[in-house]
Image: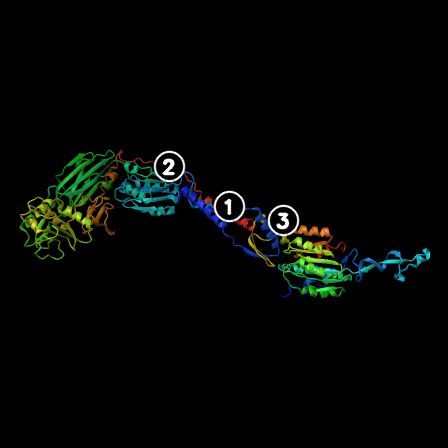
Amino acid sequence: MSPRLDRRTLCDERFLASLEALRITARRVAPRGRFAEQRSRELGAGIEFRDYRPYSPGDDLRRVDWNIHRRLGRLVVRLSEELEDLPLYLLPDISESAWLEEPPRARAGLQCALALAAVSLGQLDRVGLFPWAEDLRILQRPASGKGRVHQMAELLAGLEPAGRTNLTGALESLRALGLREGLVCIISDFFDPAGIEAQIEAMRKLRHRLLLVQLVRSTDREPALSGDWRILDCEGGEPTEVSLTPSVIARYRDAYDRFVESLTEFARSRGAGLVSVDADAEVLPQLAALFEAGVLRV
Amino acid sequence: MSFAWLSPWMVAAGALALAASLYLLHRLRVRYRTVRVVTSMFWRQAVEESRARVLVKRFRHPWTYALLLGLTLLLWLAAAGPHLGAGGSRRAVFILDGSAAALEGDLFESSVRALKDAAARSPRARTRVLWSGARTRTLLMEGEDLALLESRLSGLTPELCPPTVERTLETLLQERGGALGLDIEIFGVAPIRKDRAALLPEGVALWRSDGVPRGANRGITALGVREAASGAWDRIDAQFEAATAGGAVLRPEELTVTLEGKPLEGWSALAGPAGLRVSLHDLAANGDLLEVKIAASDVWPADDQAAVRLPRRDRIRVAVGARVAPVVAAVLRADPGVVLTEDSPQVFVRSSSESGRAALPEMVLSEDAEGAAFEVGSPADEEAERALRSAFEELGLDEIDGTELADAAGRAMEVRLRTAPVRFLRIWNELLSSRYNFVLGRAFPAFVARGIRWLASIPPIEPSLGAGRILRDPSAEIAAPKRPRLAAIGGALRVPRAGVWAAKDESPQISSLLSREASVGLSESEAAELKPLPSGAAFDPAPWLALAALALLCVEWQLLRRERIP
């Protein structure tokens, strides 16, 4: 199947320029990262002073505060804040459901992924691309550098529909990669046949910080159907025959509302970010809602 | 509410059938449209929840069903011809009297006006208009436009025939029966007998538009001829009656009787309860025209004169073979209606030992006494049973003492019927011998005389050629000038109206009105008293039902557009 999108559809210079003012800031990133702008949980030889501690053998003598030694006669070492990077692992959904409608949800999803990648790369963080459908695929191992934005845009534009939705399997594969703790951004409609409970359970097992981008449409809750329909899932499976009476439509809305409520409750309990992006509307204004004063704190 | 086309039970049954049919249609398997979606997991949940809640599959689209049922029932009711108000569901038949009875003054014109008014008031779908003249015609069918009645009435005038409304009633009731309500209204003065009105089926009512009372009238009510009482073959007797109504007086001297235009004298009138009766005896049966007139004309001149053409009774030319028994020739010579001649004979009487003459009816005296004693031959077109019956009566075979002949012969005496190109009569010559007393009995000359007349096919005398009367001769044919010939064709032939007719042999015949009902009407004890049909404006809800159905259709369309119903 030929790619559904091209690079121009995903981004242009104006798109990238509007992302320059945005930042993603972590409270503390995991240690042993590369030097970057995020504050690390580890104190070390950074620029910004943070604390003192008694000297112990093996400490770098350059960090001994000799002024204190002269006044107090004690050897203490100056501790500074370590600045490291926050790895961003982008998991865009490229299953069949993301490509069905017009415009496809994949377009909005990949734009979101590219926007977040651009923000992270702009602040020297590493970004990895892991598109998924039935399984996880490594499109780009975590890498940094502002110049990679265009390369990533090319990579994302080359994606194709890849089968059924299987988020639980994809997250299992992600965990098996043993990546350094970072920010996992799952961009999907979350319409996994396994159900929202199975997806939440799989997400709960991740030791990364989570950002959920839910791709929605107005017709998800208010279907533009009436009469008698044989409903086929775009990813296969048994058809469902239904006569659309007001009560059936009401039950459909209830089911959808429960789905959204479960996702929201999980995000709230986990402290994960959650944003709903309407696939029919422009992506950036919706994504900007995540950033308070231009900063997304994770 | 009542219905024009169907009974209420039929309407109810139809409505139930429609409701059931629509219900079944709604239960039919749904033809689903197919759509691919990303949210099928929610649809599955919605459907599974509804399945979990009910035991029996819920009726689909009850509002659609209700709307469709309402719409269908409205159309069904409109089609059934609902009727509110006067008359209910009854049908109406208006009969316009077109007989001679309507010829009095402007009676016909006023009847036509009343008919038009009534037809305009009556619902077209349930009203029929008939013309009852010499024959019954439909002037306006149910549902036809009223303007057609106007055009069909133009140029119509009463015909010189007796009242035929009773006959029209019989035809109408045979056609329709009395199952549905029927109002029959008569426009005219044609009388209806009480006993005839009493025979009307239940549900059929008879009415009469405001009739004009009959004025004083005098008329010839009967004129007929018969075989001369004197027995003379070439003579005929005639009789006529003149009656009065409404207090009119008729004296014998006001009557004029002419024969071929010449006054006939020497007759006398007998006054009776029915009027004056005059008998004329031994008139020459030579085809002269007998006319009777009432001197002073009255308000209704149609019955003031009558005429009849007397039958022509020529003697039958009979040829007799040389070997025929003398007793037969003697009987023939004594018969005043027979002349023995060899010049163009009509009948040939011969012995079986003599040869016959082609295409000539013959009486054969059989030398051979084998087979039937009496053998009657007639053409194949005569129906066998009727021919045998006619042979018995016309030949006088019923007067022969067959038992005595059988005793004398010592064997059974048979009468056999055979099919032959021309009529013949064969008897044993032996019966004429002295061994039998057949020739000595009075039945013999009667048998010979009748046999000759039957062989000569002499038609019976028509007693009267009055308009509306059925002719006695089953083979009679008549034709009005420039009109098609009328024949009985196995049934009864009725003279439609008074006037000049051509008989089967093209001889001119005169038919007169001769209707006592038309001239003097019926007595109060005989005539049914009929009242006018009560008029009332009827409300026809059919158009309103159709409009309601249309409105319902619009509602359904709007609901469909708003996707409130599938």
Q: Is disc 1 in the same subunit as disc 2?
A: yes
Q: Nearer the viewer, mark 1 or mark 2?
A: 1
- Disc 3: host chain: A
Of labels 1 and 2, earlier in sequence is 1
Q: Which residue is mark 2?
A: B534
Q: Residues within 10 Å of mark 1 (few under 14, many from 20)?
A: some
Q: Is residue B336 left or right of residue B45?
A: left
Q: SS at mark 2?
A: loop
Task: Please say whether residue B285 is visible from this viewpoint.
Answer: no
Q: CA distance from mark 1 to mark 3?
A: 29 Å
- Disc 1: host chain: B
Q: CA distance from mark 2 to mark 3?
A: 69 Å
Q: Position of residue A232 (x, y in %)?
A: 58, 57
Q: CA distance from mark 1 to mark 2?
A: 41 Å
Q: Which residue is mark 3?
A: A254
Q: Position of residue B80 (x, y in %)?
A: 42, 45
Q: Which residue is mark 1?
A: B66
Q: SS at mark 1?
A: helix
Q: Position of residue B66 (x, y in %)?
A: 51, 45
Q: Residues within 10 Å of mark 2 (few under 14, many from 20)?
A: few
At 94% from the left edge and 56% from the top edge, which residue is drawn? A73
Query: Is B315 in front, or is B488?
Result: B488
Q: SS at mark 3?
A: helix
Q: Is disc 1 in the same subunit as disc 3?
A: no
Numbered label attached to residue B152? none
Q: Amino acid at mark 3?
A: Asp
